[in-house]
Image: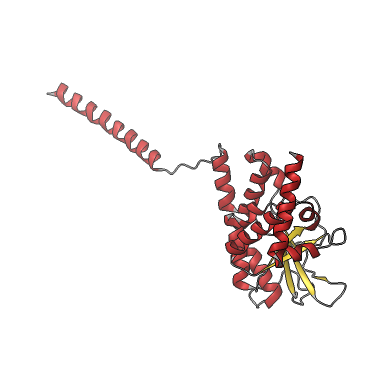
Amino acid sequence: QKSLNLRSRRMEDVGGEGGEDVGEKEEQEEKPKTTTTTPTTETEAKRIATETGPTIKETTTTSFQSSSSSRTGYCINLDPAAKYVPFQSSIDIRDTVDYLEVMRQHKLGPNGAILTCLNLFATKFDQVMSILERRCFGSTETDAPANPSSDSSPPNYILVDTPGQIEAFTWSASGSIATSALATAFPTVLAFVVDTPRCAASVHTFMSNMLYACSMLYRAKLPMVLVWNKTDVVGCEFIREWMEDYESFQEALDDAAQTAGGRG
């Protein structure tokens, strides 16, 4: 009996020690584990960049004034690939998104990088609208301007320069977000700038630009103004004639067809 009692005590001691070990293991397993992960794929990197989004920067709060009138304007540049902008932009996408870095990290071409930059910028376009509304409609006590000493006079108009690649802006989700947001808060008009000398050189180029204009008009459903540039090099009277007189345009098409046939 004594030997049996000794064995039972030893078994209880072993079982108790084993129970304590199991309990400690369970407590260790219940402790939350904190680990840090880094994106290992391009898709993950794009997802993180889209979720965090950029911070919109306003480089200057001073509006520019026209030399021929007292009207003032506020400029925004949405072309991430522009090397030179011939105006002082108060909000510039290049200050927020690095076009070359996006191209390098995501292994994209020029148009793909432009589209990705616009998409990243569009995730925080509400910040752009907040800045514009504060500049145009004034600020409240709870939303005071960051620089109270800056020019507080509201601009007469806002100029938004978009990328020259029409498809990257007009037919993208980011372009729709920007135009819809602007049209909701402000009277918005599209301005389509057409190269006049190229239209003079080819009637087909003129027709292509007209089709582009129609696509933007029906896509955005906003008023549009056609702007013919470089008229100091080539006048735009022939374009007005083509637009108002179909017979004149048809004659230009026939002449272009005959010229092409003679060359063939």
Q: Is residue 78 visible?
A: no
Instruction: Give percent across and percent down for residue 217.
Output: 62, 64
Give the quarter of the image for residue 76.
bottom right
Instruction: Give percent across and percent down for residue 215.
Output: 61, 59
Front one among 177 and 263: 263
| Residue found at the very far left of the displayed protein | 1
**In the depicted structure, whether residue 26 falls above or below residue 2:** below
Front one among 171 and 200: 200
Q: Is residue 101 visible?
A: yes
Q: Residue at x 71, y 68 (%)?
A: 244
Give the quarter of the image for residue 109.
top right
The chosen color scheme is: secondary structure
Give the quarter of the image for residue 163.
bottom right
**In the depicted structure, whether residue 215 falls above or below residue 19:** below
- Image position of 65 (left or right of 206): right
- Image position of 188 (left or right of 3): right
Instruction: Give percent across and percent down for residue 133.
Output: 66, 72
The count of marks equals 0
Q: Residue at x 64, y 38 (%)?
A: 107
Instruction: Give percent across and percent down for residue 63.
Output: 79, 70
- Image position of 215 (left or right of 205): left
User: Quadrant of the image for the N terminus?
Assistant: top left
User: Quadrant of the image for the C terminus?
Assistant: top right
